[in-house]
Amino acid sequence: MVHPKYVERAQRIRNPRTARVATHRRIDKKAKARYTSLLRVSGVLTIVLAFLMGYVVLTSNLTGLSYAVANAKHERAELQAETMRLDDRISALRSDDRLAALAAKLNMTEPESFAVVRLPLPSNAQPQRLAEFSSLAGLVVPAP
């Protein structure tokens, strides 16, 4: 007996466009799922890197300020030492012994009498005013 041959046909899809769209949606969803984990990891790494860079910037700023403070302290110490040296020199130059030696060298003597001389004011003289304050307060400097 001969058996009849049955050819099995593939089932027919009722609406091929819907199936095609569903297939494309599934493919797109899988592709997005493949990259979402990569994007999430990249986002987390970017945030961590931003915080790390902020920390580094703040630390470097603090270090720079520390160097500036140390430099200012060193400069202040040098200026104080220079001021002390100059004060010592001023006191040595103003000493009575040195001035007496210079006066003796120049044949200077103590005055025996003092004279106070008053000069008369010129007739057309106006009282002198201080230029800085005359407009503000009208200050008048008495003539000698």
Image (cartoon, helix red, strand yellow):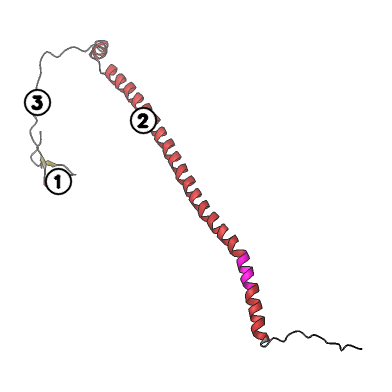
Q: Nearer the viewer, residue 4 or 78?
A: 4
Q: Which residues are magenta?
A: 28-34
Mark 2 vs mark 1: which is more N-terminal? Answer: 2
Q: Which residue is painted at 34% across and 21% down in the image? A: 85
Look at the image and tell me in which quarter the C terminus lies.
top left
Cα separation, mark 2 vs mark 1, equals: 40 Å
Q: On the rendered structure, is 118 left or right of 21?
A: left
Q: Nearer the viewer, residue 47 or 91?
A: 47
Task: Give the dominant element type of the magenta stretch: helix, strand or loop.
Answer: helix
Reply above or below: 122 against 6: above
Reply above or below: 40 against 99: below
Where residue 126 sits: x, y (%)? Answer: 10, 42
- Between label 2 and label 1, give the one nearer the viewer: 2
Cα separation, mark 2 vs mark 3, equals: 50 Å
Q: What secondary structure is found at the residue carrying circle 3? A: loop
Q: On the rendered structure, is 28 left or right of 4?
A: left
Q: What secondary structure is found at the residue carrying circle 1? A: helix
Q: Of the numbered discs in the image, which one, if any, rests on residue 76?
A: 2
Whether the magenta-drawn stretch holds residue 31 is answered as yes
Which quadrant would residue 68 be assigned to in this image? top left
Q: Of the numbered discs in the image, which one, if any, rests on residue 134?
A: 1
- Between label 2 and label 3, give the one nearer the viewer: 2
Where residue 84 sits: x, y (%)? Answer: 32, 22
Q: Nearer the viewer, residue 123 or 94?
A: 94
Query: 10 Å neighbourhood of mark 2: few (<14), some, or many (≥20)?
Result: few
Identify which amino acid the numbered label 1 is placed on.
Ser
Mark 1 vs mark 3: which is more N-terminal? Answer: 3
- Which residue corresponds to mark 3? 117
Q: On the rendered structure, is 79 left or right of 133?
A: right
Where residue 76 sits: x, y (%)? Answer: 36, 30
Cα separation, mark 1 vs mark 3, equals: 29 Å
